[in-house]
Amino acid sequence: MAAMLQPQIILLKEGTDSSQGKAQVVSNINACTAVADCVRTTLGPRGMDKLIHDDKGNTTISNDGATIMKLLDIVHPAAKILVDIAKSQDSEVGDGTTTVVLLAGEFLKEAKPYIEDGVHPQNLIRSYRTASYLAIDKIKELAFSIEGKSLEEKKTLLAKCAATTLSSKLIGGEKEFFASMVVDAVMAIGDDDRLNLIGIKKVPGGNMRDSFLVSGVAFKKTFSYAGFEQQPKKFLNPKILLLNIELELKSEKENAEIRLSDPMQYQSIVDAEWNIIYDKLDKCVKSGAKIVLSRLAIGDLATQYFADRDIFCAGRVTEEDLQRVAAATGGTVQTSVNNIIDEVLGSCEVFEERQVGNERFNIFSGCPSGQTATIVLRGGADQFIEEAERSLHDAIMIVRRALKNSTVVAGGGAIDMEISRYLRQHARTIAGKSQLFINSYAKALEVIPRQLCDNAGFDATDVLNKLRQKHASGEGANYGVDINTGGIADSFANFVWEPAVVKINAMNAATEAACLILSVDETVKNPKSESAQGEAAANAMAGRGRGGAAFRGRGGRGMRRR
């Protein structure tokens, strides 16, 4: 009786939602499987695209796993882990974002029946980790190195890796054209790791084949004043001055106070303003530079002044473009025009302004340090060009990774089938429940070739049976799905290659995500956290007053010609 009358212990605030136990793990697995199903159909050369319409009215067409995951705006806390692994795969390797989400989803799907049957999640986690170590060692063993090859051979091999990546994108029809362009761009920046040294500029109009690579810097013509058209638009071996200052006639700050005893003194103040700007322009001309670029505005006076002296100038050049010009031409960005010496000036073989579609581009080519490249993309719709840019970003990342790690494996589901076979064999040597769990891990790896077949409209069961038979025979380690015929083919011989690091990273990330989700057995949702955002917004509005409008008078300005 006493036990019945004991008071109830309340630990959590009223309204707190708490769910735990086996049901919670299964619920998390279901959420992650649903997310994996969203991107499932985008895998491979025959993958479909997704059209995502956001609340601002922007439309994005993409089949890049990471892009889709970012735009989906997932709120389920466990499913967000899959978004994070897709982002990490994108930033680390660039490709394989759909693969990593699919694998994680499939690992969890295979684990679900065991969890429902009462297997402790830690047993599964231990076996999954063991299986992933074995799989990664096997990938390293099967990888083929491109180290020690001649430059031409390397270029050909890297172009094959880029073409494999591009084959599943919207621009897959022109993959050879873009693959060689990407390899040339990556080779141009050499050992430098900074991705922003490869610029991608988008110009609507024309077709994909009109895209071109500039082994140097190209950027859109900036806003210009009168006098710009009188400037020369082509130079051979010019010196280039890079500035971070305004070359405009500016009045002193409005709140400055000057007391004059004589009206003539006002004219001397106006003259001083003019002398300052003319002094700056004189110093730019005396430096011997034929091209003057500035991150800030170059006004109408300066534009006309330079035009009279056959000097090209451009103001309001973006920070990124200015830094790339500095890296390519060997110049240094100056914050003052005093003491400009030859060492801070850049140079290039040819500078010209060229019409590309409706835009005019300033193009610097034949740069001495040559550590930059620009790809100018053409195409019909804006969404198409945006997707082409994302595709090229993936290809650039892949080529950089392949250059660094220099080992490649067979694509088209070949490596996944081989590891699946290897793990099944290994599982037979293990006594206990681990045998079942490692078998499930091996089965989950088959999702890649199966999905490739499904997306291409082939009979997945038939193709997978052929692949299992070929891999079991011991001589078909490189056999994968043949997308063109619907059968199986030697992926390595058909040049369907991808860097080993893509697969290693995908296995690691997917296994970690699956283990993390399996290890969560309770979710506590704080009732305040849902309304916190609304309250914060209300508080911010309440504490904001309206300032009175300030009216300032502006004095006139005298003018003097030189």
Image (spheres, rainbow, N blue to C red):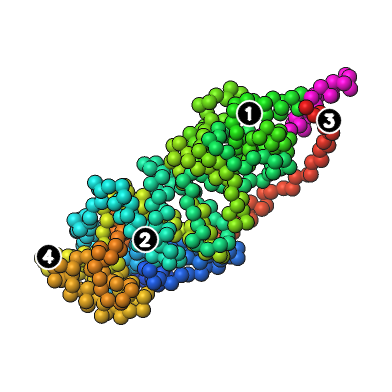
Residue highlighted by disc 2: 163
Main SS, magenta region, reads loop
In this rendering, the answer to whether 562 lies above or below 504 is above
Q: Say whether disc 3 or disc 1 marks the residue closer to the N-terminus.
A: 1
Residue highlighted by disc 1: 284
- Residue sitting nearer the eye, 174 or 294: 174
In this rendering, the answer to whether 471 lies above or below 507 is below
The residues bearing labels 1 and 2 have C-alpha atoms spaced at a distance of: 47 Å
Residue 124 screen position, x and y as percent: 24, 64
Which region of the structure is painted magenta? 246-271
Residue highlighted by disc 3: 558
Q: Would you say the residues marked 1 and 4 are in contact, meaning their CB atoms lie under 8 Å apart?
A: no
Q: Quadrant of the C terminus?
A: top right
Q: Would you say the residues marked 2 and 3 are in contact, meaning their CB atoms lie under 8 Å apart?
A: no
- Whether residue 371 is visible here, answered yes or no, is yes
Pointer 3 local density, CA inside 10 Å: few below 14, some 14–19, many at least 20: few
Q: Say whether disc 1 or disc 2 marks the residue closer to the N-terminus.
A: 2
* Number of callouts: 4
- Side (left or right) of 551 relative to 347: right
